[in-house]
Image: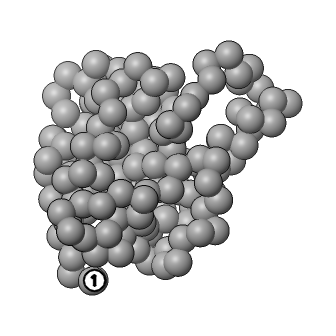
Amino acid sequence: MCLSKNKMVHVIKPPQAIGSVEDFHRTVFLAGSIDMGTAENWQDYVTNSLDIDNLYLLNPRRDVWDSSWQQTISNPQFRGQVEWELEAQEKAAMIAMYFAPATKAPITLLELGLFASSGKLVVCCPDGFWRKGNVEVVCDRYNILLINNLNDLIETIQNRFSLNS
């Protein structure tokens, strides 16, 4: 768990069970650029910037990632990570998605397609992301709020869940 400006923001990361969430109506899945740990840790920036009481952030970025894990369905650690992420996105009230400009984010692009019609996506895609045009078209087609910078994404989360405190 993480304290943010005297308010309690609960952070759940794999392999911690998602079942520890008390209220899924107050959950945000932090989807976005990780690129095997090479992307900036934007998830911590978001977490530390929020001032919302009793919000649950489902953060797929593990504190310890083993890059030697074979990425195959037969590897229980890898499969568990992917299943954790899918379950978290399915249960979350909001999916806040960030495409860092210096990354490729192939899994995030996959997740954009998987959850485009869910009604719970908010997408941040700054100028410079290599497939911004594709992201713009998908967001337009599925009426997904598209934001150009991380601080506006934080403000969007803050506004949505502060109203429901």
Location of mark 1 (residue) = 164
Whether residue 61 is visible here, answered yes or no, is yes
* Left or right of residue 2, residue 29 in this image: right
- The N terminus - image quarter: bottom left
Residue 136: percent from left, percent from top: 27, 39
Whether residue 160 is visible here, answered yes or no, is no
* Left or right of residue 139, residue 114 in this image: right
- The C terminus - image quarter: bottom left
Q: Residue at x 44, y 77 (%)?
A: 25
* Left or right of residue 138, residue 16 in this image: right
Q: Is residue 19 above or below residue 141?
A: below
Q: Is residue 85 above or below residue 158?
A: above
Q: Amino acid at mark 1?
A: Asn
Q: Residue at x 80, y 36 (%)?
A: 76
Specify the color scheme: one colour
Q: Residue at x 30, y 61 (%)?
A: 3
Between 24 and 2, which is closer to the camera in this rendering?
Answer: 2
Residue 13: percent from left, percent from top: 53, 49
Q: How many marks?
A: 1
Between 82 and 51, which is closer to the camera in this rendering?
Answer: 51
Residue 156: percent from left, percent from top: 20, 61
The crowding category of the residue bearing disc 1, from other C-alpha atoms within 10 Å (few below 14, some 14 to 19, many at least 20), is few
Between 95 and 56, which is closer to the camera in this rendering?
Answer: 56
Q: Residue at x 34, y 43 (%)?
A: 43
